[in-house]
Image (cartoon, rainbow, N blue to C red):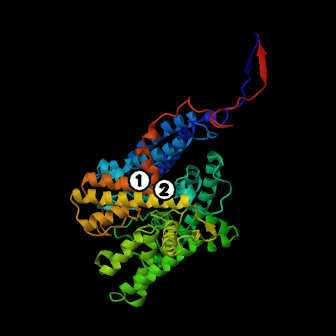
Amino acid sequence: MRATTWTEGPPSVSELRGRFFAYVLGTALLALAAAATLFAGYALLLGEPTRGFALVVLAALPSGIVLRGLGSPNAEPSRREALAGVLVTWLLMPALSGVPYALTDGVSLVDAFFEGMSGFTTTGATTITDLLALPTSLMLWRAFTQWVGGIGIVVLFVAVFPQLAIAGRQLFFAEQPGTSEERLAPRLRSTAAVVVSLYAGLTALAVVAFLLARMSPVDALAHAFASLSAGGFSPAPAGMTAQAPTVQWVAVAFMFLGGASFPHLYRALSGDARALFGNAEFRAYVAILLVGGLLLTLALLPSFGLWDALRHGVFQAVSLTTTTGFVSDDVSAWSLPAQALLVAFMFIGGSAGSAAGGVKVVRWLIVVKHSVREVRRALHPRAVMPVRVGRRVVPEEVMRAVVAFLTLYLGLFAAGTLTLVTLGADFVTAFTAAIACLGNTGVALGSVGPLGDFDAFHPVSRLVLAFLMYAGRLEVVTVFVVFDASFWRRPRLGGRRPGPGVGRPRRRGRPTERS
């Protein structure tokens, strides 16, 4: 009797399942180790402590080498594996980046984790009461983490989330190359290359602009990181309130760019201006900033002169809508109508595919258009009235996804507010702190105040706020997936026979016979 065996060729994509997670996490850890090495060298040149950065290298470098070795750049992940990769990477990187803070006097482990999460999620909230006591290298590290977080979220939204049919695919209406069925691994590499090139170029331009506005080199670099990433960390205790009006206007320009869609910006800079100005979300984004800035200017006129009111109005409208979180003045002393506008801005967010957090403009566009359609349907119940964003018809499943997102988002915001109140915060402080962290804005009112910090919160409250930052940055739905029992079940090997090309690796090579 003869038996047929197979001479195996290169492993198929499905045979590499399970190795994408290791490769991506290992690559992220190696990148963090490289950055920490550079900052350790910078601290050594300045005569500052290097132990915190050295510990990051010691933790990230060996584990990164091992994980990258176990992984494969050609691996194609399952949906569960890709989600796990996103969730673990965005939890481990902030935790490791907080190590240098933990070795600073007066900074607890909870505060160090809070600071690391605030940086990587580009929230900009802080528990450090004396910024001037921080070494220069650690201050710049603080700004650098939010810059990396800004790159990371754009890559996730443009390359990863569309593949997972979570948030990005339904809401990102750019005409991206490829389809949702395209393999994730090559798309991730190509998208990252485009985003990093544009992001680095705009950062360099921002540094030059701040230098021309007469900032010191370190401050110019830190504020460039903070503005473009929609982060809001400033090396100065008074933030932007102590800066000259010229510096504030420069910040407005780069906060605006940080809140715009990077793929649309890239296409516009490549010569296709219609990709930006013909986009419905971008037009709505600009209109919100203009109208919001005008309304806030009018609310500030009783307290400021015309030009100062205009500067503060435009600055705060851009800063809070893009979730950057810079403040140009002590806004806690402003009138109640002005403060109400500030809180409203915190619920909007920037464009899809930007570094900004929040709900995103395109979601609000869909909600508004869907609501208008339902009102009209009350008068014309049999009429066919598709919802359009620009020239694109929004499918019904997309609108259901938007409703689900908003339900989870607002539910988490309410739960966070209630938890903070239960742990001792007053309502105004709890309300604004919860939306500041969930929306990655970092600016709160009440006892915290825009010029204050989050150190007064109970340690458990700080952990709750760190979770809100984490959930808000990862589009909420991604985090709630872990609460579904099916996420933790191992895939069944038996059961229904898969269709052609699904779940069965194809053998490659020629068959050989043996006796």
Residue nearer the viewer, 278 or 319: 278
- Whole-percent x, y for residue 329 in the image: 35, 77
* Residue type at the position of mark 2: Gly
Q: Residue at x 22, y 57 (%)?
A: 422
- Whole-percent x, y for residue 153 in the image: 51, 56
Residue 382 location, quadrant: bottom right
Is the residue marked by circle 1 packed among few (<14), some (14-19), or many (20+) residues within 10 Å? many
Residue nearer the viewer, 37 or 462: 462
Q: Residue at x 74, y 29 (%)?
A: 508
Q: Secondary structure at mark 1?
A: helix
Residue 326 location, quadrant: bottom left
Where does label 2 land, which residue? 149
- Whole-percent x, y for residue 189 in the image: 63, 49
Residue 354 appears in the picture as rendered: yes
Q: Residue at x 31, y 51 (%)?
A: 463
Where does label 1 land, which residue? 470
Residue nearer the viewer, 355 or 132: 355
**Quadrant (top left, top right, bottom left, bottom right) of the N terminus:** top right
Q: Tell me how far mark 1 sits from mark 2, CA to CA.
A: 11 Å
Q: Earlier in the sequence, mark 1 or mark 2?
A: 2
Residue nearer the viewer, 310 or 166: 166
Q: Secondary structure at mark 2?
A: helix
